Amino acid sequence: MLILFLGFNISRYIRAKSHNMGKRKNQYEIDEAVNLFLQEAGIRDEYLIQRMIQNWEDVVGNPIAAQTDSIEFHQGILKLKMKNAVWFQEVFMLRSQLLEKINDFIGEGIVKEIQVSAT
C-alpha cells in the first residue's frame, strides 16, 4: 500500500512539475536526479563509459567503429584494439581528436589517455 501511495505522489509531483515548468525543465530534473544517484552509488564514470561503448559508432564514426576489435577502460585509460595495422596507425594519429569526441560525449576528465594496439 505504501508503494502505491509513493508511486501516486511521485506521479502527481512529476505531472505538476511538467505542467508548471514545461517538459524541458522536468526532463532536466530527472536527468539531474539520475546523475546524482549514479554519482552517489559510485558508478557514474562506469555508466558513462558503458554508454560510450554502446554508442561507439555515434562517438567516433562508422569507419573507425567498424575497425575497432575491442574497447577496454581502466583508471582513465581507454584501450582500443584495432583489427589491423593500417587502422592502428590511423587511430594512433587521431588520438587527440578522438579524445575530444569522447569528452564531448561523456564529459571531461573520465578518459585521460587513449592507447591503441592492433590484433
Image (cartoon, rainbow, N blue to C red):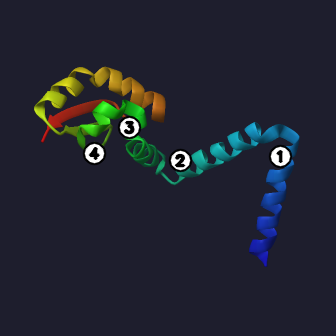
| Residue at the image position 40 percent from the left and 43 percent from the top | 49
Whether residues under marks 1 and 2 lie with C-beta atoms below 8 angstroms apart, the answer is no
Residue designated by label 1: 17
Gap in Å between the C-alphas at discs 2 and 4? 21 Å
90 over 58 or under it: above or below: above
50 over 92 or under it: above or below: below
Residue designated by label 2: 39
Residue type at mark 1 is Lys
Query: Crowding at label 1, few (<14), some or many (≥20) Cα neighbours within 10 Å?
Result: some
| Residue at the image position 68 percent from the left and 47 percent from the top | 30
Residue designated by label 4: 72
Where is residue 67 drawn, in percent x and y?
24, 37
| Residue at the image position 78 percent from the left and 75 percent from the top | 2
Q: Is label 3 or label 4 in front? A: 3
Can you tell which quarter of the image residue 3 is in?
Answer: bottom right
Residue designated by label 3: 57
State the mark number for residue 59.
Answer: none
Can you tell which quarter of the image residue 57 is in?
Answer: top left
Q: Earlier in the sequence, mark 2 or mark 3?
A: 2
Query: Crowding at label 3, few (<14), some or many (≥20) Cα neighbours within 10 Å?
Result: some
Q: Earlier in the sequence, mark 3 or mark 1?
A: 1
Relative placement, left or right, of 62 versus 117 is right
Question: Does the rendering let one see residue 109?
Answer: no
Relative placement, left or right, of 102 versus 64 is right
Residue type at mark 2 is Gln
Query: Crowding at label 2, few (<14), some or many (≥20) Cα neighbours within 10 Å?
Result: few
Q: Is label 2 or label 4 in front? A: 4
